[in-house]
Each structure stands twice: as structure tokens, then as C-alpha cells.
Amino acid sequence: MADGQVMKRAKYKSSVKDPGVPGVLKMTRERFVFMPNDPNSSRKLNVEFRTIKGHKFTKEGSSRQALLNLTQEHGGNYILEFDSFADRDICREFVAAAIAFHGETGKATSEKPAAPLQGEQLSTAEMEHRIKLLQEDNELQMLHKQFVIGGILTEAEFWATRKKLLDQNDRRMPKQHVALKNEMWSVKPLSDGQSNRVTFNLTPEIILQIFAEKPAVRQAYLKCVPIKMSEKEFWTKYSRAEYLHSTKNVVAAAAEAAEDEELAIFLKQDDMLANEARRKIRRVDPTLDMEADVGDDYLHLLDHGLLREESKDVLDSQYEPYRRYFSQDLNQHAAVVLQGRVVDVELGDTRSVAEALARTKQAELANEASEGNSEIDLSHRISRIAEMDDLQGPRDPAVAHLCIKDPGDYFDSQQANALKALGDTGSGVKTLKCNVSPLEAYGSLRELVSEIRVRGLSEPITNPEVAFTVLSGLTQNISSTKYHLGKNPHESVLDSLPKVTREDLLHHWTSIQELLKHFWSSYPITTKYLYTKVTRLKDALSQVYPKLQEIKESVQSDFRHQVSLLVHPMLQALDAAFAHYDADVQKRSAKNGERTNGFV
Amino acid sequence: MTIPTKKKMAPAASKLYADDVSLLMVLIDTNPFFWNSINTSLSFSKFISNVLAFLNSILLLNQLNQVVVIATGYNSCDYIFDSSALQNHNQKGESLLQKLEEFVDKDESLCRDDSVDGPGFSLLSGSLSMALCYIQKVFRSGPLHPRPRILCLHGSPDGPGQYVAIMNAIFSAQRSMVPIDSCIIGAQHSAFLQQASYITSGIYLKPQLLDGLFQYLTTVFATDLHSRSFLQLPKPVGVDFRAACFCHKNTIDMGYICSVCLSIFCKHHKKCSTCGSVFGQAQTQDSSTPDRKRKTSVDN
Ligand SMILES: [Zn+2]
Ligand SMILES: [Zn+2]
């Protein structure tokens, strides 16, 4: 349990009110040492635990300071303040262990000096906890069986890596509240399939959840049970309402509600919730940045893509109060779950649960009302929004609006050239009429449309000979443009070259790359092997050089320019390699000038 | 040449389902003055029947293919066919023709001109925008959608007044990676569509034999985007990007550009004739440039 030592930042104080001297506290089994941050400070401590009799500490929550007070046998004490309660607790445990250790050794000097780990004595509670952990986790159980029972690991070793699991059972931890189930109580009626009877299962847990999520139901319960109806009647009615909701038949629900006042409470939208929602909306931070949502791509989905939403059919407004929206339910449920278990009463007694919940709600409201300055706070915040960047117009100097007199100018600026490049201007198509009235033009167009409507599509749609001419024309056109070097940057210059030249160029380029790769990776030359390799590579590279020149000269003058453009980077790469080689040789010879022979 | 476009939101990521499933947006030129002004073997009725046959073949190529037709009129444009919204699949042609008739009526009712000289312009900028809107809707419809492309079957001459709108549409298409194919059925080439196809990597073609329009359509424009990477299709000859100056309409290699509206001038002006911006003194010497730069940065 006790590791070798503990080191924490702390303040040493002469009294609780003393601000204290900041420093570092180091504790071992034997002693604790306090070193002030200021090396000149005289308030150092070096005390043996043997002399410490007891310790006191402040409770978390009740006090602001995380204090630890170590008391000495003859009345003296040391007050230490820690940065956090967590730090303090670690030290407190350590101190407790140390005091206990010295107390024991003081009594019975060396019964069991230092073998706490091997024959680890486990309390029954601890043992039970481990067994429970194993039972809950199949995987853990298998591992345990395989290694511990298989004799590969000891029990202690096995659990040593799972300290976290064990810590959860730490008795010193405050008792944890069980949160509300993160599961919506949706009506899953159990029908026996034969009769019209539908059964709902209500547990105290579910009732708590219903009360928490639906204040109107809670209120109705407090009002009606048991004066107006029995508990059973109440829940039967509630279940009936839930069942009606589950059928999504708003009209039927409205009809039933009209006849039954209590049922209507369950069927109608929860007014208390609506009020609360309104209240909450007023409290939304006005600086909330709604723009952050704009880019989300699901915005176009109705209801954020929630599938369970009711049909979208339009209903009379009289049915509106009976509609329930899944998204609302979901939000309310989420809010309640996040709030956690606010009441701490025995679940069995439905009435006291309802009352407790009502009390907490009232307390909440009262709290809110007492925070009178919230209004001021709100207006303060609103005034601050004005300073938010994305809610402000640009701060640049006033900009004059772009005002283009005639966009046609742009058109004229371009069209002449664009059309020139295309060459022909409408051969075979001649403009016929110059001036027509809309009546005439639309009339003839309409005529032509109705012509097809009456006659149907012409048969055949296209003349085979024409089709053939078109097809061969297109093919020719395509194969000619393929070798036509346009201004299209996507077209490779290589494609325009004669096949032999192209292949030669490609071959040389790949071999140069290969040689250069080896060449450069041989530097710096550290061994004789690398030296001979570089020499070999340089010779090979210098043989490529004239070949590239040859290719350049061999091609026809039309291509010479393009080929030299292609060859140029290759030559550059070669030149760089040669330059490096020469420089290296010179450096080497200068260095080795005095040496008679030998290489490096 | 580019003109300032508004900064737009990042395009919805293209989520594709199969490589070869297409959404074909076909823009057909229904400018009555154009169809009235030409005298070719291609009448509007023949054109429409060729297009109908072509649309049928597209829908037969892949069961999931989708075709939307937008009529580009003289005064307006509108969707006249959407294969995905069609109830009765045997009535494709009939429904298109009926919508077309309705469209022609509506377009006429909007006409304010007493007479139109020449072929007039059709509202290409409008139909391009409608096509792009439809495509954006499809992009946002969910993770599964066909690969969209736009085919302009266009005959009317370019309308200079639509320059800014059309260029904006072209850049928007480029941003969403939507190719614009152009098939020119009129007398003149279209500089707009030539640029549109060039910028968006679409195909620009002006058929020589309008009699064989159907053959051109099926051979060149039926190809889905995936297959295009394997096929040799008509390539653009290249667009001459040199511009003419706004002042004299001379083609220039070097000139002055208005920093506000990007108008081009062959010599220095005191004021931009397009947007009215007043220019400072021309910087004659290079040495003065650094000074000026420093000054402006301090001002900011
Ligand atoms: Zn000029
Ligand atoms: Zn300008």
C-alpha cells in the first residue's frame, strides 16, 4: 500500500490563519521533510514520524483549505495546506500508514517487518468485491482463470494492474448517487394477442422518472390520489393516455380527452413544462453563437433526421394541444437525466416521491427569483454581444458598391477572340427572317410542338447514312485533335513526339533517376566501397550526357524546341551531380594533400 | 478572365453512389425568335424528337439515371420534365410536350416587345442557375445521389447583358465540379458555352451536320462522367484567353486592369469607364513602388 515516498506541493503554516510558506513536502516511511521554495527561508522541517502521534484534517466541502495537521507527542503541531483536497488525501493516507507503522513497530518490534505484498491479507469485504468484479465481467473472469488459476500470475499481480477497478469500492468515497436511467420510458404495451387487454409495467423507478419528466402528471397525482381516485385508477388512466399517444391518433386522443377531464391532463401538452421552457429560453446566454450550426449538413433534414416523428399531416388547430413531439420528449428526458437524482427518498412511496419532487422544483424557482440581479446580468451580457466578431459588420472603411455600367463590355472584350479561335462562322446555316413579331414567332413554335404531339416521333429518328457520316466525322476529328497541339495544358508534349524519340527520352529519364538516387545516397563518402561506387555512378552518368544531346539533334526542327525543353531538366540534374562530385574530390584532395597514399 | 464573385459556402461534399449513374440536366433553347430565324434541315419539331429519343436512351442506359429538362425561353425559363417526378413512365414524351406547350404560352405572355430583330437572346443565365440549384438540392438530399452534369442544347447567340450572371453560374458549376456540356445548334459559336465547357471540363461541340443531331448526342453527350476517363471525346481546340480592351476592342497581350471591376484597358485612364473608379497617377518608375506599398500598409 505505502509506496516508497510521497511528494506534494504544500504550504507550511504556523497557524490556520497564517498565509504559510510555499514549498515542497516530501514524506517517506521514516520522516517528512518540508523544503520552502525560497531557499533562504528558515522554515524548513525535517521530522521523524516516530515523534508524530496523530493527525487532523479539514473536511472537504466544509472548509476552503485543504489542511493537514500533524500533532506531536509533546503538544507541538505542524499545519500544512495543500493545493487540493486530492493531494491532501494522498498525504493523509500516507501519514496514517506511517503513524500506524511506527506505532506497531514501537510495540512489537519486528513481527512482520516488510512483506506486506506476498501474503496479502484481504478483508472479507475486499474479497467479496473482487469476486463481484469477476462475476460482472466475463472477460476479466477468463483472464483471471487463465493466468491466476493457471499459476502464471499471482493474485496480487493480477489485481495490481487493475487498481482502478478495486478503488471503486473504496469505502472512504462518498456514497455515489445512482443516476436516472438514460433510457426513455416508452410505452411498450404487452398485449396477449387475444383480448384487447394491454398491460403496462410500472416500477417505482419508472414512476420517479415520469414524475421528474412530466410535472403535470406529478401535480395531478398529488391532487387526485387518493381523494378522487385510487392509485391504481390513476396509473390506469395514465397508461391509457400513453397508449393513445403511442397509436399516434391525435384525433382519437382529443375525442377521449373531451370526455374525461383527468385523462385530458395526461393527453394535453404539459403546461408546466411549457412554462418552464419559456423561462429557460429567457435565461439562454445571448452570446450563444447560433452561427456555428449553419454549416451543418443535416439542417435540411426535417426534425434533424429524427425518424420517430409523427406524420406531418396538417391537423386542425383544435388538435394541436394533443400533439406530442418526439424531439420535445427527448429534450425533456435529456434535461432530467442530466440534472440527476434530485430527491433522496425511498422510492416505494409514490406520494412522498411526488411531494419531494414538487418541493425541489419550488426551491429551484425560489432560488432563481432570489437571484434578482439576473436581469442586470442579462442586460450586461446583451450589451456584450455587440462586441462579438461574427455579429458585427465589417469594420473596414465604408465600401462603395460595385456598379457596373454595362456588363456587355466584358462580353465584347472576350467574344471576339473566343470566336476567332473557333474558326468557322455558321456555314450552311443562314439567317432567314430579320424582324418578326412575338405573335408570329411563338405561334410557329407552338405549331411545331403540336406537330410532334400529333404525329409522334419521326421514324427513323436518324438516317443511317447521316449517322455514319457523323460517326466517322467525329472519329476523324477526335484522332486529329489528339495529335494537334493546342493550348490545352493537360495535353502532354510527349504525345506529340515521334514514338522512337519519346521512348528514348522516357528511358533515359528513368535511368538517370535510378543512377542519381544511388549517387546522392552514397554521400557523405565514409568508406572505400562508397568511393568506388560513386566513381562508377559518375562514369555511367557522364555517358548519358552526350546521348541526350544526340536525341536533341536527331529530331526534326519542328520538335527540337520541345525536346530541348524536356531534356533541359535532365541535364540540370546531371550537372548538379557532377558539380557535387568535383567539389567533393577537391575537398578531399586538399585535406589529404599531406598524406602520401591511402584513400580516406 | 474572372470577375469578382461573392464568397460562397464550401460546396457540399460530393457523395456519389455509383460511378456511372447520372443526373442529366438538359437545357433546351426554346427562344422562338431563334427557331424562326434559321432555315436549316433542323426544325424545332425535329430537334425535339431527336432530344426525346436521346433522353430515352439516357434513361435506358442505367435504371438509376435521372433526366431533368429545363426550357430556356426568351423571357423566362422553367422545368418542363423530371424523370424522377414522373408517375406514368409510358407518358414521358407526352408529359414533356404538354409542359413545353404550357411553357411557350407562359413565355409569350411575358413578352413585352412588339417585334424582335434577328434571333434574339435566350435566358441562358436563368436556366443555368436553375440547373445548378436543382443539383445543389440533389447534393443535399442525402448521401446517395447520381453524378450530375449539365447539357446545354443551345442555338441563340450569346446575350452580352447576361455576361456577369453566366460567368457566375459557370464558376459555381466549376466549384461544385459539375461539367457543362454544350451542343451548339445555332449558326454561331457561343463564347459563353465554350468557356463554360472549358472551365468545367465539359464537352463543347458544334455539330457540322445538324441532320445527324441524334448521332452526335448519343455518341458524345450520352457518355457518363466515369466513362469519360476511358474515352476519347472531342477536345476543345483551346480557348484564346487574350482579351480585347474595353476602350477600343483591340486584342491586347498586356494592358491596364481596373482593380475594382477588372475592366481591361490598353492605356492608362483617369477613371474606369465601367465602374467609375478614379485611378491614381500611373506609376512610371519601378523604384517608386516600394514607397507606395509602405504607405498603403501604414494607412491600413
Ligand atoms: Zn483600348
Ligand atoms: Zn472599373
Image: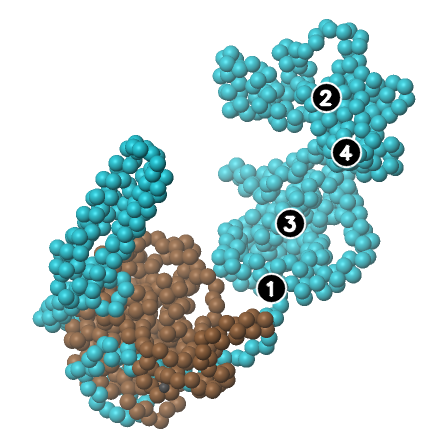
Q: Which residue is mark 1?
A: A390
Q: Which residue is mark 2?
A: A28
Which tag is nearer the camera, tag 4 or tag 2? 4
Chain in brown on the image: B
Sequence-first tag of 2 and 3: 2
* Residue A234 image position (x, y, % from top left): 69, 43
Query: Label 4 amino acid?
Result: Pro
Q: Which residue is mark 3?
A: A332
**Which hue is chain A drawn in?**
cyan
* Side (left or right) of A434 relative to A292: left
Q: Which residue is mark 4?
A: A39
Classify A376 as above or below A539.
Answer: below
- Helix or strand or loop: what does disc 3 sit on? helix
In the rendered structure, are the residues bearing label 2 and label 3 in contact, judged by CB atoms less than 8 Å apart? no
- View quadrant of ligand 1: bottom left
Sequence-first tag of 1 and 3: 3
Choose top left, top right, bottom left or bottom right for residue A269: bottom right
* Number of other residues with Cα within 10 Å of mark 3, as a class: few under 14, some 14 to 19, many 20 or more: some
Choose top left, top right, bottom left or bottom right for residue A419: bottom left
